[in-house]
Image (tube, rainbow, N blue to C red):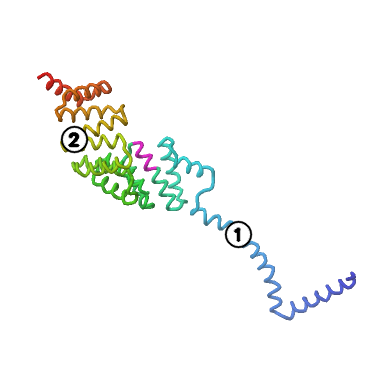
Amino acid sequence: MTASTKTGLLGRIGFAHSYLFTSFPPYRFASIAAPVLFVLAAFGFWLMPHANQSSNGGNAPRPGPVSVADEQVCISNDDPNEIIAACSRLIEDGGQSPHDTGVDYYHRGRAYLAENQFGPAITDLTQAIQLIPNDADAYVDRSDAEGNEGDLQDVIRDTTAALQIIPQDTDAMLNQGRAYLQEGSYDQAVRSLTNAINLSPSANAYSTRGQAYGEERQYAASVQDYNQAIRLNPADESSYEARGASEYNEGDYTAALNDEKTALQMKPSDTNAQNVLQMAEGKIGQ
């Protein structure tokens, strides 16, 4: 196309535009509106990502390094006070899923438990259970806190719930056995502790069952359990003291005297060992 042809074409288009703009109102309206609509559309495309970022800010975790660091500390085995602070920041941020918030409550509750702050531990672990109802560990840890608060029925309730989720949870069995023992339900204590021993023998389970047998005056069975507890953990002074008491009640005063002497070598301030030792010496001296 030559320059003269191009000029002629542009002239004809310009004339048509001028004629329609003057004599045809719809064309005049469209001519005015089109540039305005184009500008608005361009502004809208620019605005959309910014609006999305603003609206999602309250519903998504902050992506910065502080949040990532807090997540790592919250689920770690670090200092309990650092865990409490990190988990608290995550909870207060409010930008996580219900499940992840439940995890934060769980780990903060465990940190409170480690610091012997049993009330806050129970509160947080309750929140964790509400958000993650099938978390057996949360029930077991809450039962730990409840046991330290003396809430034996709550311990039994929580350990029962944990065992419904994981029937072979030996930690739940141990806590349940201790609660039954403290409550005076010795048969049920023996049953729970026997289940734990059958699954995973431990010095703790044997010594606790030995105490339950002793309360039932089954002294031979008690001594046998303390034998196993000492075999698994020979450094536990309390097992020597308790075995000596069962041996004394069984009438084996020499064995009782020897065990109480061992206990007192390990812990000279143990008044129970001192008392049983004196009684055993009295029986032997008769």
Residue type at mark 1: give it.
Leu
Asked whether 163 or 44 is in front, the reply is 163
* Above or below for 226 versus 38: above
| Magenta span contains residue 190 | no
Q: Secondary structure at mark 1?
A: helix
Main SS of the magenta part reads helix
Q: Residue at x 90, y 70 (%)?
A: 2
* Above or below for 69 versus 226: below
Quadrant for the N terminus in the image: bottom right
- Dot 1 surroundings within 10 Å: few (below 14), some, or many (20 or more)? few
Query: Is 52 displayed left or right of 279 in the figure?
Result: right
Q: Quadrant of residue 248?
A: top left
- Which of the marked residues, 1 or 2, is nearer the chain's N terminus? 1
| Residue position marked by numbered label 1 in the rendering | 47
Query: Is 219 displayed left or right of 55 in the figure?
Result: left
| Pair 1/2: label in front | 2
**What span is colored magenta in the figure?**
108-115
